[in-house]
Amino acid sequence: MVTPRSLSSSGSSVSPSSFIRHDWQQEEVVALLSSPLLALLDKARSVHRAHHVRDDVQLANLLSIKSGGCPEDCAYCPQSARYRTHVKADKLMDVQAVKAAAKKARQRGATRFCMGSAWRSVKDGKDFDAVLAMVRAVRALGMEACVTLGMLTQKQAQRLAQAGLTAYNHNLDSGPSFYERIITTRRYEDRLRTLAHVRASGVQLCCGGIIGMGESLQDRAELLVVLSSLQPHPESVPINALVAVEGTPLEDQPPIDPFDMVRMCAATRIVMPQTRVRLSAGRAALSSEAQALCFYAGANSIFFGDKLLTTDNNDCDDDKALMDNLGLQAPEPTERTLQRATN
Ligand code: SAM
Ligand code: DTB
Ligand code: SF4
C-alpha cells in the first residue's frame, strides 16, 4: 500500500502526480470513512493543499431542460413516471429559453452550466439536435457546458464533443452491491459503458453518487473504490445527499448525519486528489458550519442557483456570504472560455 508523506498531518513536500492511485482497497476506504473526524480532516486537507493551489469553489448552475415522465425506476427520483410526486412531465425546453437561463446564471457568477433531462437514454433526432444547439449556445456565452441525458452511445458522445461539451454527468449513484436495491431498470454495467463512451470522446467525466439511501459504510466505500478505479479519475465527482421527495419509494428515509457528508467529501478528496468534489444535492439541509467543514475537507464545487433539477437549492446570496466568510473564491474562467465570452 502506498502511504504518501502528504497523508501525515505534518507532511508538506508532495509531488502531486506521484500518488494518484487507482487501486484503493475496500478496507482502506472503510478505514478512512470510519476514522476519527479530526484525523480524517487533517488527511483530507493535506491532500487538498498538495493538489489545489487556491481555495476556490466552482459555481455550477443546474437547469432541468426536460423534466419528469421518465420510464426508469430509480427509487430516489421524483422524475420517474412510476411515482406520484410534485413533478409533472414536460417537453424539452427550447434553445432560446435555455440560453436566457444560462446568461442569467453567468451574471450571477456561475462558470459552468449543467443541463439535466429525465431520459433513460438519448434518442437521435429532433431532441438530441436541440441539446447539441443548447451546448453550442452555452459555450458561446463563455461558460463551461455539462449535460446529463442518461445512457449514451459512442457516436452520441462524439457528437456532444464536437458541439463543444465540457463535461458529461452520469452518476454511478451507489456501490455495485447496493445498486440493485435502488434501480432495477438498468444495470451497473450499462452505466460503466456510458462512462467509457464519454471518456473515449474526450469530454470530461462528471460522476458521483448519493448517500442517505439506506446504504452501509461498506456500500459508500464500494462507490469510492469504483470511482477511483476509473483511469483517469473523473474530473468532477458530485456527492449528493438524498433529497427525500414525497411520493418516491425513499420518501421516509431519515436525513443523513451532516458529519457523514463531511466524511464522504473528505474520503473522496483523499482517494481522488485532483478531482473537483462537488457538494451537491442535500446542501440546503446543511448548516453553514457543516458546509464549511465539507469545504475544509476538500469540496471545491457546488450547485449555485435557487433550484437543483426539481427541488430547491440554497440561496445565492447566502452562498456568496459563506464563501466570503471562509475566504473561498470562484475560479477564474479558463482562457478558452474567456475568448469565447468576448465573441
Ligand atoms: N436521467 C438521467 C440519469 O439518470 O442519468 C439524468 C438526470 S438524473 C436526475 C441525475 C442524477 O441526479 C441521478 O443519477 C442522481 O444521482 C441525482 N438525483 C436524482 N434525484 C435525486 C434526489 N432525490 N436526491 C439526490 N440526488 C438525486
Ligand atoms: C448530480 O449529481 N446531482 C444533480 C445533477 N447531478 C444532475 C441532480 C440533483 C437532483 C436533486 C433532486 C432534484 O432536484 O430533482
Ligand atoms: Fe429517470 Fe434519471 Fe430520475 Fe432515474 S434518475 S428516474 S433515469 S430522471
Image (cartoon, rainbow, N blue to C red):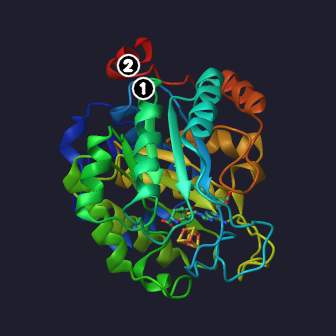
Q: Residues within 10 Å of mark 1 (few under 14, many from 20)?
A: many
Residue at (52, 38) in percent of width and height: 113
Q: Residues within 10 Å of mark 2 (few under 14, many from 20)?
A: few
The residue where tag 1 is placed is: 140
Residue at (69, 50) in percent of width and height: 283
Across and down, in percent, residue 329 comes to 56, 22
Across and down, in percent, residue 93 comes to 61, 49
Q: Quadrant of ligand 3?
A: bottom right
Regarding residue 140, the answer to whether it shows in the image is: yes
In this image, 233 relative to 206: left or right?
left
For mark 1, give the secondary structure: helix
Work out which residue is located at the far front of the displayed protein and give it.
126
Q: Nearer the viewer, residue 49 or 137?
A: 137
Across and down, in percent, residue 30 comes to 45, 70
For mark 2, give the secondary structure: helix
Quarter of the image containing the C terminus?
top left
Residue at (21, 34) in percent of width and height: 15
- Residue type at tag 2: Arg
Across and down, in percent, residue 10 comes to 39, 36
Q: Looking at the rendered structure, which numbered label has been put on residue 340? A: 2
Quarter of the image containing the N terminus?
bottom left
In this image, 221 relative to 210: left or right?
left
Earlier in the chain: of badge 1 and badge 2, it is 1
